[in-house]
Structures are given as C-alpha cells and as structure tokens.
Amino acid sequence: MAHHPIDDCNHSDAEHFQEVLARGRLSRRHLIQGGLGLVAVSSIPLMGMSEARAEQKPAELDFDAVAKSIADQIVLPAGFTFTVLHATGDRISSDVPDYSNQGTEADDWSLRIGDHHDGMDIFHVGPRGRYTERDTRRAVLVVNHESSADAHFFHEKGQTTNGVSGKKFSQFSASSGGWDLGTRLESEVFKEINHHGVSIVEVRRGRDGRWEYVVDSELNRRVNGQTPVRMAGPDAHLADIHRFMVTRYDTTGKTSRGTLNNCGHGKTPWGTYLACEENWATYFYMPNGSVDVDAKTKASRQRYGVIRAPFTGTTGAPGQGWSAVATKATDDRFARWDVSAPGASAAQDFRNEPNTFGFNVEIDPLNPDAVPAKRVAMGRFAHEAAVCSIPVKGKPLAFYMGCDSQNEYIYKFVTTAVWDPRDEGRGMAAGDKYLNEGTLYVAKFNDDGSGVWIELNTANVSALNPGYAATYTFANQADVLVNTRHAATAVGATRMDRPEWGAINPKNGEVYFTMTNNSSRTVANTDGANPRAYADNDGLTRSGNPNGHIIRFRELGSVATAVQFTWDIFLFGAEEDAGAGINLSELTDKNDFSSPDGLWFSQATGICWIQTDDGAYTDETNCMLLAALPGQVGDGGAITVNNSLGGASGSKNTFIGATLGEARLRRFLVGPKGAEITGLTETDDGRTLFVNIQHPGENTPALGAGPFKFQSQWPGNEGHGPAGRPRSATIVITREDGGVIGL
Ligand code: FEO
Ligand code: CA
Ligand code: CA
Ligand code: CA
C-alpha cells in the first residue's frame, strides 16, 4: 500500500498451510535447510497486495470458542482435556517429601518447583543425551518463575515480621516518616529467595501419550535467587562491564548470584534457554539513615525504579524485606539486598548488586554443570521475552526483546556471528559465540507506518541528543549496555504501551509484540503505534489504553540485520460491547480479550497463541488463551482512531491488520480466578500444548486472624494435588481424539 513506504509484500510460501501440515511439520530444521523461509522470501518477485492476500488466506480454526468465564476452573472447548504436569511446590527429588500445601516445609525449595510459572520451553533429548530439534518421548521442560507477590502462601501462618504472623510483609508500612523493615525470619526469607528463578525438569511421554515429569531425573535442577552466575559480554568492553558488577561477593565483578522475576523467555537455535529478568528492580532496599550512593548511581537507579532511598514514601513495599534478617551483618546472603554504600569502595558492600540484574540469563537445560551466563550485550532493562529470528545459515541472528513498563521500548540484538547449524546442541559455548558480540538497537515507530532501528552506542547517545548528558552521562559502551534504558531514551525511541512478549511468525518471519496496556497513555501523547487513549466505563473502570494491542512488523528485505521495518497493528484488545472507536478489531463475544501478554507461534500449525494478564475485564471474565490465524503486515489498511479521555479529544492515524473474524480468532481457554495465562510450548506434532497458569487466587487477602479467604483454590479444587491453597501450574492440553490442536 502506498502509505507503507516499505511495502515489499514479501511472503515465504504461497502453499496452503494445510498442505504443509499434511506433508509434515514446518520446523526450523526445514527452514534452515532452505525449503522455506527468509532465503526464499527475498527471491519471490514483488506482487500486488490483492494477489498476496488471496494466496495467504489462512485456514479456519477448528474448535468451538469457549465463553467468557469467572468460574474457578480451566474451561476448554468440547473435545479437549488437560492434566496438571507440575505445580508450585512439587518435588523434583525424592529426597524431600510430597508438598503439603500448608506452608509447613522447611527451606527445601532448591528441590521443588518454584512459584508463578511463566515463560517456558521444551528441549528434546536426543541420542547420547544431546539436544535435538526432533520430537522425542524424552525432553526437559524449562519454566520461569516470576515473583513472590503471594509469598504468604509459603509459610504456615503467612509472612512473619517483628514476630507477628498473618500479614503480608508489604503491609508492614510506614512508621514515623519512613519504612521500618522490622525483622524477618531467616527460614522464611530463604524459602522466598529459593522459590524464585527457573525450574528445569525432565518430562517423558508414556505409551498412553501422557506427559509426566520425572521426580528423580539427573537433569532436574533449580536455578534460583542464589545460584552462581557469570557476567558475560563483548570482549572489548568486558573489563568495563565487570567494574559495574563489583561487590563484596566478587570483587572482580566477573560473577554474581541468582536470577529473579523471570518472566518471558527465549529459546536459542543452538538449544539453550534465555530466562528474562523483568521486575528485578523491586527487590532492593536502603534502610533509613544508611550511607547513600553517588549521584550517577542514583540517576541509574531512578531510571530502573530501584529504590533510591533512604525511602520515605508511605506507599509500596520497600523491596522484599530479604535484608531484614537478624544475621544480616554477618551473612551476605541477606546483606546483598541492602544496596546502601557504607564501604570505602564498591568492593566492600552491595551498592552494585542491582547492576547484576536486568539481563537475559542463558541456561543450558541439558547440562546441569553449565554455569548460567547473564548476557550483558543484550542490554539491561525489564526484560520480557527474547525471541530469535528464523535462523538462516550463514546470516546473523536477531533477538527481539521488550522492556515491560509503561512507555518503555522494543529492542533487538543482532549477532556478529553468522548462524552455523552445526552449533545445534553446543550449549554455552555456542551462547558465548552468538550472544556476547553483536549490535543492540532500539525501535522507533514512525506515524507513516515505517520504523527504524537505532543503534545504541556512545556516538549515537551524544550525537542524537547532546542535552541528555544533563540527565545521564555515559562513560563508555559498557555504560550504554548497563544503562540501556537511559541510552534508549537519549536516542529518541518510541514509548510503547508496555511491551510484553514477542513472537516470530514461522511462515514469513514477521515479528509480533503484545502491548499489554498503559494507564498513562493520554490523548495528547498517542502516536501511530500506540494510538488509543480512552475511558472504559463498563464495569471495572480503567483509562489510557486499558485493553492493549498487538503490533507487528516486517524487517526491510525480511532480514534480521535490517535497520528499517514496516509495521501495523495486528489486533486491538477491547470488550465486545465497547464503542466502535475502541473495538477497532471488531471483536465479538467469542474472541474479545483485554491485556494481551504471552504470545507464541506454533511451528506445527502456524497458530498465533495469545495469552492475557488482565485487570480491566476481570469483572466479566478470567484471563484467557486465544488462537489466531494471522495474515501479514499490510493486509488491512489505514484508519483514524478518535480518542476521548479526561476532557481531551483528538484523532490519530494508524494502520490496522485485516479483520480476523471468528473464523480466525477464537477463545480457546479461560483460566481460574485471579490467574494469568502465560507461557506456552508444544510438541512438534502440534498435538500437545503445555500452558502455564500463574498465580490463581492472586487477590486472596493475607491470612489475618482467621483462615485464608481464598479467591481461588485451583488446582486442588479440580482434583489436582492437595486441596487448599491455590498454586501456579503447568497444564498439558490434548485433544481427546489425539488430533492436532486448533486446526
Ligand atoms: Fe511479567 Fe511483563 O509480565
Ligand atoms: Ca470494563
Ligand atoms: Ca462489557
Ligand atoms: Ca508477562
């Protein structure tokens, strides 16, 4: 279309997708070997959009959409069933007893499944225990564990502070003008630190087709808040990077401990897992009266929301209270969360501890001896998913990444090394080859439907915005990588409506990103890529962009190294009875949704799975999973959005994808109360889906004087594990007739 300046209409396969399915799965292996994909894309001559549309018309979905639900259960279409693979607290070694679900465990969480299941991927085990992309009956499932907002469920009587149990720690609020951390129990704090991180467990498919996890596999392990990690980065800047990481734990800054708040994820073509650190900034604290950090460190912390203290506010929790243990003075496992600066240098305290978080953490799932690596070259921010472009032999790879906070950015990292399929299965050595050296970019979306990637380097941050030095001065390239958010603001990136997950369409390499919502979007600061600002006054009232949208873009020439792209908005979330100016994607009762978060393309079916983490529509429905069959960027057209909010009104031009209708967008699952639906992977034949149910019962009040007043008691209430407290879980969904899911 004329209004898309980079409208090359490239697409990879004119073949009907059902025919691809009939022949066998569409896998990365096929793409690497050149049967389909980006190499083929660029050789297809340009064609008119109408021809492209006709040839790309996707198949229809084949299941009955489920209704919205506020029941405390999993709702699936007729003909589908689920089992619980594992839930929070399940043991991964028979050295510990079965989970009580009463909070009576000791600190044995290094041998149990963590909490808040989130991003997830499956790694098949091939001959001689090596990673393979081929479907086998034996695999390792890796699951992120996001946070500890419900930590009161892990203790018998809720959290204990100053000897009082039953309140959430965060309820011990201001006393005389500042926060008093009080004193927390060592045993409780260890339980909380250790249920964070990542669970890595072996799963097997039995003869009956059912997947179960193996309690005593040698491959089972936890990477948690205390696991040793190494700080990895580009050779030329590594010494400078390590200077940012110096603490009393490692005065060289080469190593650190733990990963926290692992949300979205990535899977590399060589077979490793990227656990993305999202809201890590909320774990640190400075006591009142403690020695403050220097001005530059303060400016860094401010941009990330690290408590900059002495904290004198009266709302919000000061960290997680993990430094408030009586033995802190002599035990660095607690002292590390106090990020004040009492020492003569950074080597004598933990002022730099926050610099060691905010990265993609690479883990080799099939090698328990491999030390996880934090990939500093990919930037430091509230990482939310790191999705790899379709690998093309002999070409660089791109990893697309979101920073999930209001008005933050979309990034990409392009590897210096070119893809060599022989690196499949080479673990962390391959990770060092691809993820240390490369170029980091941030996205700028232009209102005309084009976009550019701006490289983040010392030259650009000063050339593009010399005035930014008044806010933050970059010492060197290591500083750009460690203070990525500052760098991205300096170069003028587009402020997005909370970038959550990304996903790559395996058919054409186009990149999709969920913008989950943004309560701070106003009519005045809308832009083409974030064009809505409105009030939702139906039921729960919210404003800004409360229902979110999904943006997608095609790189110029469909190559990972492009510095220009074309975008449109694939879908706008909305209540089906919202006004026409809000429900722009013409959603109906069968496919309306709010706050898209998890996003994942099936290699087997081409379905784009959309998961929600919502608080705007929960009066009418719990969070959900939808299936979509997308076309491609530019298959819709230009529209004008008429906004009205808070007395202001105005219009904004944007580009919207073709209306999908119920044939190509349907609700597949609704979760239990208070849960977010997040994390999804499948077996390569498309017949088994693994889906994560995070924090059911999230809004259960603290214990108080009486028994818990549960918002949810899932999954125990559906017969999965001990009844009582709600638990996050991985469920396994199959079709009762054993067929491919969704088509
Ligand atoms: Fe952890 Fe951005 O959701
Ligand atoms: Ca509403
Ligand atoms: Ca409604
Ligand atoms: Ca998320």
Image (cartoon, rainbow, N blue to C red):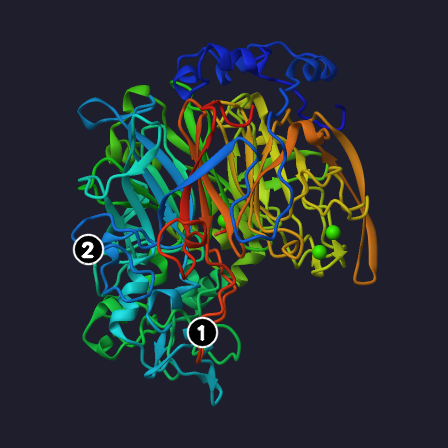
* Figure check: 466 above or below 318: above
Closest to the observer, 193 or 287 = 193
Q: Nearer the viewer, mark 1 or mark 2?
A: 2
Residue at coordinates 30% horizontally, 25% vertically from top-left?
Answer: 207
* Figure check: 632 above or below 112: above
Residue at coordinates 72% horizontally, 30% vertically from top-left?
Answer: 661
454 left or right of 352 in image: right
Disc 1 residue crowd, few under 14, some 14–19, many 20+, Cα 10 Å: some
Q: How many marks?
A: 2
Q: Earlier in the sequence, mark 1 or mark 2?
A: 2
Closest to the observer, 4 or 581 = 581
Q: Is mark 2 within 8 Å of ligand 1?
A: no
The residue where tag 2 is placed is 96
State the SS at label 2.
loop
Estimate the spatial distance between the alpha carbons at disc 1 and disc 2, rounded to whole Å. 30 Å
The residue where tag 1 is placed is 170
Q: Position of residue 56 (x, y in %)?
A: 64, 17
The image quarter containing residue 727 is bottom left
Closest to the observer, 681 or 498 = 681
Q: Which mark is residue 178?
A: none
Q: Position of residue 429 (x, y in %)?
A: 24, 33
State the SS at label 1.
helix
Q: Position of residue 254 (x, y in %)?
A: 23, 52
Q: Position of residue 362 (x, y in %)?
A: 32, 42
Whether residue 78 is visible to the viewer of this picture, yes or no, is yes
At label 1, the amino acid type is: Ser
**Contact between labelled residues 2 and 1, with CB atoms less than 8 Å apart:** no
